[in-house]
Image: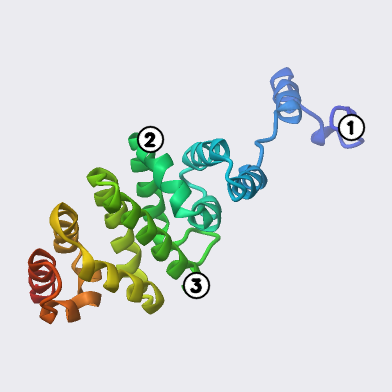
């Protein structure tokens, strides 16, 4: 009403279409910010609520463009809760991990902080470890690619210390999966080149690191 009866005639809607557009705009539902709901679900998940975990992953998955949901919330979810939920929903796991990889450089409003980068890599390592322990090779491969994407970009020692111990312990099919990922991610593989001379590590891991760092 204020716009339609403005004292300046030039500032009033000039046509019926202009008036209709104004009415639609003023009555349009505002999009709900998903972050408060995600934080509430994260808190509930912390109490052991598995339903909250599934709902949280679905919420984050519905907003692949949201940096804060992925880096600030998803990467705070206990990996022992996230792992089973991701295993139950392979397509959702694929989409979540791919979206997290896309946030490696931040966005127009968020600059990645070193601490956040380390936390993301450590979280992804936890998902990799869960997947390897439960022989979920698809989840292991997807999580490892995302982990190496972030590690290759941010080179955080606190995360690499954990990954190094894990790489040295890998055997069997898990070692084969990770060796293939390392060959595809030489920017990350070079951070673990010291393992190539460790004879306690699986030969496939050592060979993959040797080939990646040679390139």
Could you tell me which residue is drawn at 51 percent across and 53 percent down? 77
212 left or right of 63 in image:
left
Closer to viewer: mark 3 or mark 1 = 3
Image vertical order of residue 16 relative to residue 27, above or below: above
Instruction: Point out which mark residue 115 bears.
Output: 3
Res 138 → quadrant: top left
Is residue 49 shown left or right of residue 184? right
In contact (CB < 8 Å): disc 2 and disc 3: no
Residue pointed to by mark 1: 2
Q: Quadrant of residue 96?
A: top left
Q: Are marks 1 and 2 in contact (CB under 8 Å)?
A: no
Give the mark nearer the N terminus: 3 vs 1.
Answer: 1
Disc 1 on helix, strand or loop?
loop
Q: Which residue is mark 2?
A: 88
Location of residue 33 in the rendering, given as x and y in whole percent from the top left corner: 65, 43
How far apart marks 1 and 2 lie (CA) works out to: 54 Å
Closest to the observer: 5 or 92?
92
Q: Percent from the top left, x then y, of residue 161?
A: 34, 76
Q: Nearer the viewer's eye, disc 2 or disc 3?
A: 2
Residue 201 vs 141, above or below: the answer is below
Report the colour scheme.
rainbow
Question: Neighbour class for label 2 at 10 Å: few (<14), some, many (≥20)?
Answer: few
Residue 159 falls left or right of residue 55: left
């Amino acid at each position: 009403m204020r716009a339609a009866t403005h004292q300046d005639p030039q500032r009033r809607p000039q046509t019926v279409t202009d008036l209709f557009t104004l009415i639609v705009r003023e009555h349009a539902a505002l999009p709900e910010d998903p972050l408060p709901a995600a934080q509430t679900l994260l808190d509930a998940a912390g109490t052991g609520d598995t339903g909250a975990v599934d709902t949280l992953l679905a919420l984050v998955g519905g907003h692949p463009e949201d940096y804060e949901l992925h880096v600030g919330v998803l990467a705070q979810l206990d990996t022992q809760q996230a792992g089973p939920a991701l295993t139950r929903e392979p397509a959702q796991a694929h989409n979540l991990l791919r979206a997290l990889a896309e946030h490696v450089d931040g966005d127009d409003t968020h600059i990645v902080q070193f601490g956040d980068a380390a936390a993301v890599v450590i979280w992804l390592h936890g998902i990799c470890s869960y997947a390897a322990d439960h022989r979920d090779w698809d989840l292991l491969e997807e999580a490892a690619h995302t982990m190496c994407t972030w590690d290759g970009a941010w080179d955080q020692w606190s995360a690499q210390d954990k990954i190094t111990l894990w790489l040295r312990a890998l055997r069997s099919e898990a070692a084969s999966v990770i060796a293939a990922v390392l060959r595809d991610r030489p920017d990350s593989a070079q951070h673990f080149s010291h393992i190539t001379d460790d004879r306690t590590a699986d030969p496939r891991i050592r060979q993959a690191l040797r080939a990646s760092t040679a390139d």
